[in-house]
Amino acid sequence: MSKFLSLSEAISRYVHDGDTVALEGFTHLIPFAAGHEIIRQRRKNLTAVRLTPDLIYDQLIGAGCVKKLVFSWGGNPGVGSLHRFRDAYQSGWPVKISIEEHTHAGLTNRYVAGASGMPFAVLRGYFGSDLFEQTSNVSTIQSPFTDEKFLAVAAINPDVAIIHAQQADKNGNVMMWGITGSSKEAVFASKATIVTVEEIVDTFQPKFNSIIIPNVLIDAIAHVPRGAWPSYASGYYERDNDAYIAWDAVSKDRESFEKWLADEIYGESGAKP
Amino acid sequence: MTVGSNSDIAAVSAVSDVSGEKKPWNSNEMMTIAASRTLKDGAICFVGIGIPSTAAILAKSSHAPNLFLIYESGTVNTDPKRLPLSIGDGELANEALSVVGMPEIFNYWLQPGHIDVGFLGAAQIDRFGNINTTFIGNSYDDPKVRLPGAGGATEIAGACKEVIIIIKQSKRTFVEKIDFITSFGFGDGPGSREKHGLIGNGPKYVITDQGILEPDPVTKELVLVSLHPGVSVESAIENTGWDLKVAENILTTDEPKDFELKKVRELVATSSKKSE
């Protein structure tokens, strides 16, 4: 049952060294503030799962929190490369990371299997792609009904899912709308769930295409306005495309990244727009 | 070989322009417009950001008002008025008939074969339309250049009824052997897709800055069927890393029309202004 906690308390209680974490949200509602708090609390050896690592995992990787990245598209959307990811993967700075690479359909279905309480999910996917040979947690399975072979992906059940949503009500239910990616599946698949929200309201007013996550599925809610910046929260603020572009220069070399860490994360101000 | 004589996209210009004069449009604009013309009204189309989005919005504003656009971020039948700057741009959600989660996009829309046309880009392509978006170099574990990876592309290449690939043509991109097959085209020729159980028909057009290629119906090898105005066959051959097949009756792509150029420039201008 969800409890309202400070972000610092929520991370401290539910994210531990060595955990498998899934900070989800597809372009929209990416829980950046929670990621920054994980860096601030200097968590280590995380297995970090996300379809698109985006800047949030580039930052966690650069800060040395991650030992393994599980992902399906690793770029800075609309800009270019994730330099901290590449530096860690190719040069081992600040720590060597391993990768487990999927397609969006494959990783989405790892969450679906995890959410469904099944050991694997079955799909038509990866066939003909060299990725099949490179990636663990992917195999083939014979249909019990026909001669056809399909692809199976192993379930993923993270220790903790962290998502950002627009609103929580007083009873600790959460409402999100707009693009929700694989957030719902990540919540159902995970052993614990932290949600950061823009606003706490008395009662929800239904929104176009909204989804509700009832309080029984949530462990901690933290009220963090602008907690998805520089991604966006529909109804609250737009994506800060300039910040995504600016990240390219910040992350390009180790010195400028370390300065960013010192100024924006470890410094007193925290990352603010 | 008589490929391309029925091409429905590259109507023959009355006069081919081989004068080499500077064109009043650039190759990105030509690629975008050529891609846009391939989209039929009413088609269900899986789109990405960049040129595919520009092409799709142009098509919707001209010959294909009922084009049904789906983005992998979950926006279904969306009608963006400006260019989306990211795959999950708020504009795509705000203008959509419905917004759904990603399992629904991949498992219910793409996998069973509901999508007519999928757009893909690539860093490398081979003569059978197999494409690489994963890495450049000799080794997956120690790449020379690491690229973003598959995203939605592998299953788009597998399950869409047709695939349109947009890529600039050069010896670096059109290669004899790609470093990694991220997404499957025709493998090593006829029968490969069937062997892998892929339900879609594979690449239908490859649109480049030089012209348009289509797979030979029998051999599945890409054949140059149309040249953009002002481009020579020699140039297309020179920019290909294999022995490029050229259709006997090669066509010239129609010049960009004024309304096409106007719309493309309008869209691109808003997007660069936004990201300045």
Image (spheres, rainbow, N blue to C red):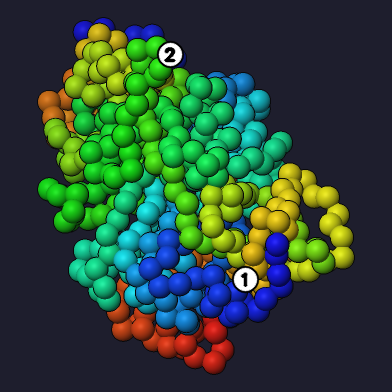
Measuring 51% from the left and 34% from the top, which residue is drawn there? B106
Residue A120, given in percent of the width and then of the height, sits at: 43, 37
Q: Which residue is mark 1?
A: A227
**Does dot 2 land on a helix, a strand or a loop?**
loop
**Element on which disc 1 rests:** loop
Sequence-wise first label, 2 or 1:
2
Q: What is the x, y in percent for residue B13?
A: 40, 19
Return the x and y of residue B249 as percentages of the image width and height.
27, 11
> Which dot marks residue A27?
none
Which quadrant of the rendered structure holds the C terminus of chain A? bottom right
How dense is the environment of label 1, judged by Cα within 10 Å: few (below 14), some, or many (20 and up)? many
Q: From the image, which quarter does the N terminus of chain A lie in?
A: bottom right
The picture places residue B217, in percent across and down from the top left corner, at: 29, 10
Q: Nearer the viewer, residue B60 or A261?
A: A261
Q: Quadrant of residue B143?
A: bottom left
In the image, residue A48 sits, relative to residue A210, either above or below, namely below
Read off the residue under disc 2: A145
- Residue under the point 58% across and 53% down: A187
Name the side, left or right, on which B53 lies relative to B254: right
Image: B50 above or below B228: below
Please name which of the two marks, 2 or 1, marks the residue nearer to the observer: 2
**A145 and B8: which is toward the camera:** A145
Distance (Cα) linking label 2 and label 1? 48 Å
Q: Chain of mark 1?
A: A
Q: Amino acid at mark 1?
A: Gly
For the question of whether residue B131 can be seen, the reply is no
Name the image quarter holding residue B156: top left
